[in-house]
Amino acid sequence: MTPTEILTLLHQRGLIIDPGASCTSLGGGVSSDIWLIDDGHSRFVVKRALPKLRVAQDWYADVSRNRHEQDYIDYVSQFLPDAVPHILHREPEHGFFTMEYFGMDYHNWKNLLMAGKPEIDHAQRAATTLATIHRHSWNDPEVRARFATTPQFFQLRLEPYLLRTGERHPALQAYFAQEADRLAATSLCLVHGDFSPKNILIGQRRMVILDCEVAWFGDPAFDIAFLLNHFFLKALLLHQISGRYLALTQQAWKAYQAIARADQLDGLEERMCRILLMLMLARVDGKSPVEYLTDKTQQDCVRTFVGGILPGMDGRLDNLCRSWQIQIKERATCQKAP
């Protein structure tokens, strides 16, 4: 649907007064069209999933993920109502929904991190929220049935992140393929699937999780690793203050453990570390590379680190952080050398 068609439909539904209302793309949407609607009386967001994602390579995914996102928001809002957007209207026949708009009072967490503002409190709050969702949904048969979305998770994560990256690194391919198979067969709790700082808004009273369309009943290790991976990569980018980003990693993990159930933690750290290493490489050589590691020496730093650590990793996050800190410092030293 075009913006004009959506405005017409919103007017017919009585959601806007003027069919000629402002419809502004909010940008940054790889997998969805996201528009801000403003008719002078109300402002809200429309989100519609795309069948082909906006990346350089061909990447297609089932648009039913728009419904899965609404289901995730509905579920989490039952016990953490302020942690997700409030849905205002649903339009299943046309594949979109509307939700509240977060204005200038909210800051995108990724933007804060990219500006060299890593705050321990933000990492702790995000990890606490994540652990609460995982704990609340742990082995819940109704939630498992509601989010039996492994085929979509394969399209959006396993194939583009793990399998494609493994293909580009033959020496590591078996590790990536085995992990993809293990994840596909794991069913423990509700996983966000895209728990990244870019999908988290921070306000004075609320921290809001966005972009829940990858929602899947699977392994919580994926969510934690997905978050920590962004701290690891930004530590490389902003190497002068890398220690502060790695501190976020350790404090987030501690906050998560404080909320999680004992059986939820069984084997979790080892799985998390393995996925973290794979996601680091995936964000360089997978279908969705991060846009800020454009320097080949930065990319090679990630490749060298993962290639050297993954085959014999010991599954301890503190050791992984120390090793990554050493790798970053060695790269910085080499850059300074005449």
Image (cartoon, rainbow, N blue to C red):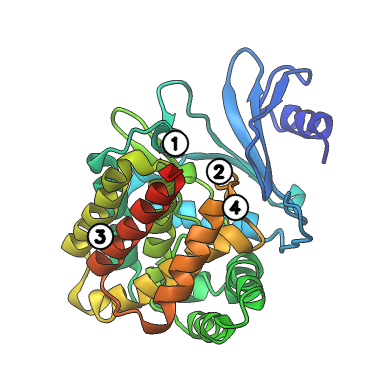
Q: Secondary structure at mark 1?
A: helix
- Estimate how packed mark 3 is, as few (under 14), some (14 to 19) or many (20 or more) residues with alpha carbons within 10 Å: many
The residue to which callout 2 is attached is 292
Give the mark nearest the N terminus, 4 or 3. 3
Q: Which mark is residue 296?
A: 4
Residue at position x 79%, y 61% from top?
58
In the displayed structure image, the side of residue 142 where residue 44 appears, left or right:
right
Residue at position x 31%, y 40% from top?
241
Task: Between label 2 and label 4, give the one nearer the viewer.
Answer: 4
Q: How far apart in space, not on screen, are marks 1 and 2 (Cα)?
A: 9 Å
Q: How far apart in space, not on screen, are marks 1 and 3 (Cα)?
A: 21 Å
Task: Between label 1 and label 4, give the one nearer the viewer.
Answer: 4
Q: Secondary structure at mark 4?
A: helix
Q: Quadrant of residue 300?
A: bottom right
Give the mark nearest the N terminus, 1 or 2. 1
The extreme front residue here reads 338
The residue to which callout 1 is attached is 114
Provide residue 74's location: percent of width, then percent of height: 46, 53
Q: Is residue 70 visible?
A: no
The extreme top residue here reads 40
Mark 1 vs 2: CB contact within 8 A? yes
Give the mark nearest the N terminus, 1 or 4. 1
Provide residue 130's location: percent of width, then percent of height: 33, 57
Q: How far apart in space, not on screen, are marks 4 and 3 (Cα)?
A: 30 Å
The residue to which callout 3 is attached is 253
Give the mark nearest the N terminus, 2 or 3. 3
